């Protein structure tokens, strides 16, 4: 939820300002038998029926060895069990870096031991002015650099250009949903057509559709399900290996005054609509600071909501015919700057941010906590770098980075790296 999309101008200014200071894999996903449905939400079964696609796994991505195959993944998974993978969630920032900054960020990702880079593929960036013009060059550089570094890209397809947005919010926000889902689906189809040959097969369709900040007309499960129904078959029409993720659900309570719908309610509504048949995995954004991810409470935390609270995400998936569907934690983390006093322990109350020491503890605990949840396949830290300096008026949402704005590493960088390496070493010993 802290992730805020950057405008082209503001992002460009920030990364130009940071240019002089610098910015300082492994997944064998469980095979998923997927029912692929096309058409509108009301007519998906009548139009297409179901097709099993056991070969579609995230290992088709660019980070996999050239000889990797679905049969290899299946054998390894069945013999050695689940292998948790890790990633960094960049939002729109990676797209606007210079080539040097981007290469340094990817070198840092490799040093951390992550495999995945979650990056906004903003429709507004690609087609800012009309349906007839495309500006792929910046995202081309992201994909090409990731390929050169042996990293996989998870593009988040989202953010509507003004010419294609719902007229109720077209002039105010790029998180306005599209006026015509077919236009968004065509953008997604062209993106898959362009990047599948470069090894990009895993896609997240929108970001946090259950809260107004990222679905500006107000969360609407039926409308989001219609977007999925148009987009999923469009992507699959050009890439038989496409692996699709539900737009990352913000971990929130239902708050009508803020137009928030809880992650559990929204997922259940999508299940009732049959929309979960369109995707291969769901994505979820559990932020729990100052509580550590492994900490439980009598009423349940955002991490406990995955599989331990009443009517948890795993239970909802099973109830609506998707038992065993993988869950990707495509955002989580803790900010180190904000208003008021920073929390330095889990007992802190009413804080907006944590100390660098507690952020490091959170990063370390995130790996062990995620590894203990059988349904979680991939976990991403948000984010790589703070997006502005620490000033009295700076918001906590700008300071989730493993590095400061000037490129210095926070203690969480080393803590996350060491926890990942420890997990991978243990997995290697089991192999």
Image: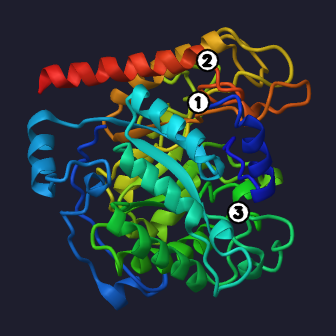
Q: Which mark is residue 105?
A: none
Q: Residue at x 26, y 57 (%)?
A: 60
The residue singled out by tag 2 in the image is: 410
Provide the secondary structure element on which disc 2 rests: loop
Query: Left or right: where does residue 409 sit relative to residue 391?
Result: left
State how far apart marks 1 and 3 are (Cα).
22 Å
The circle drawn on residue 215 is 3
The residue sitting at 18% across, 63% down in the picture is 54
First along the sequence among labels 2 and 3? 3
Residue lying farthest bottom?
Answer: 47
**Vertical placement of residue 15 versus 166, above or below:** above
Q: Where 184 sits versus 310, above or below?
A: below
- Is residue 196 rendered to the left or right of residue 361? left
Residue 49: quarter of image: bottom left
* Residue 83 place in picture, x, y as percent: 25, 36
In the picture of the structure, the residue carrying the numbered disc 1 is 333
**Residue 41 placed where, x, y %?**
49, 80
Left or right: residue 342 versus residue 56 is: right
Residue 235: x and y in percent read 41, 75
Q: Is residue 237 above or below residue 381?
A: below
Q: Residue 153 versus residue 253: which sits nearer the camera? A: 153
């Amino acid at each position: 939820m802290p992730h805020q999309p950057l405008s082209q101008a503001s992002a460009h200014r920030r990364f130009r300002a940071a240019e002089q200071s610098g910015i300082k894999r492994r997944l064998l996903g469980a095979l998923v038998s997927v029912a692929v449905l096309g058409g509108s939400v009301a007519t998906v079964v009548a139009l297409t029926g179901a097709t099993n696609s056991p070969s579609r796994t995230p290992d088709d991505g660019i980070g996999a060895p050239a000889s990797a195959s679905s049969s290899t993944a299946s054998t390894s998974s069945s013999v050695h069990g689940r292998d948790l993978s890790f990633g960094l969630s960049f939002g729109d920032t990676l797209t606007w870096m210079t080539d040097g900054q981007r290469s340094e960020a990817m070198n840092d990702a490799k040093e951390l031991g992550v495999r995945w880079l979650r990056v906004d593929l903003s429709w507004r960036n690609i087609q800012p002015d009309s349906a007839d013009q495309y500006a792929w060059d910046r995202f081309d550089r992201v994909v090409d650099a990731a390929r050169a570094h042996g990293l996989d890209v998870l593009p988040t397809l989202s953010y509507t250009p003004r010419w294609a947005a719902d007229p109720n919010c077209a002039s105010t926000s790029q998180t306005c949903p599209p006026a015509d889902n077919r236009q968004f689906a065509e953008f997604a189809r062209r993106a898959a057509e362009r990047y599948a040959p470069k090894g990009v097969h895993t896609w997240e369709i929108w970001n946090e559709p259950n809260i107004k900040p990222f679905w500006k007309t107000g969360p609407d499960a039926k409308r989001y399900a219609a977007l999925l129904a148009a987009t999923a078959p469009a992507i699959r029409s050009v890439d038989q290996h496409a692996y699709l993720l539900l737009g990352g659900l913000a971990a929130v309570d239902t708050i009508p005054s803020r137009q928030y719908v809880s992650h559990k309610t929204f997922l259940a509504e999508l299940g009732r609509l049959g929309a979960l048949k369109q995707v291969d995995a769901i994505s979820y954004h559990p932020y729990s600071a100052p509580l550590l991810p492994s900490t439980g409470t009598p009423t349940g935390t955002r991490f406990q909501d995955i599989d331990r609270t009443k009517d948890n995400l795993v239970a909802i998936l099973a109830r609506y015919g998707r038992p065993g569907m993988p869950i990707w934690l495509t955002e989580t983390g803790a900010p180190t700057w904000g208003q008021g006093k920073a929390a330095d322990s889990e007992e802190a109350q009413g804080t907006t941010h944590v100390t660098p020491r507690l952020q490091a503890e959170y990063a370390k605990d995130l790996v062990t906590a995620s590894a203990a949840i059988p349904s979680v396949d991939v976990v991403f830290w948000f984010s790589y770098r703070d997006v502005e300096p620490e000033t009295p008026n700076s918001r906590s949402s700008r300071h989730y980075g493993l590095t400061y704005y000037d490129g210095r590493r926070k203690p969480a960088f080393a803590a996350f790296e060491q926890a990942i390496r420890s997990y991978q070493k243990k997995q290697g010993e089991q192999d």
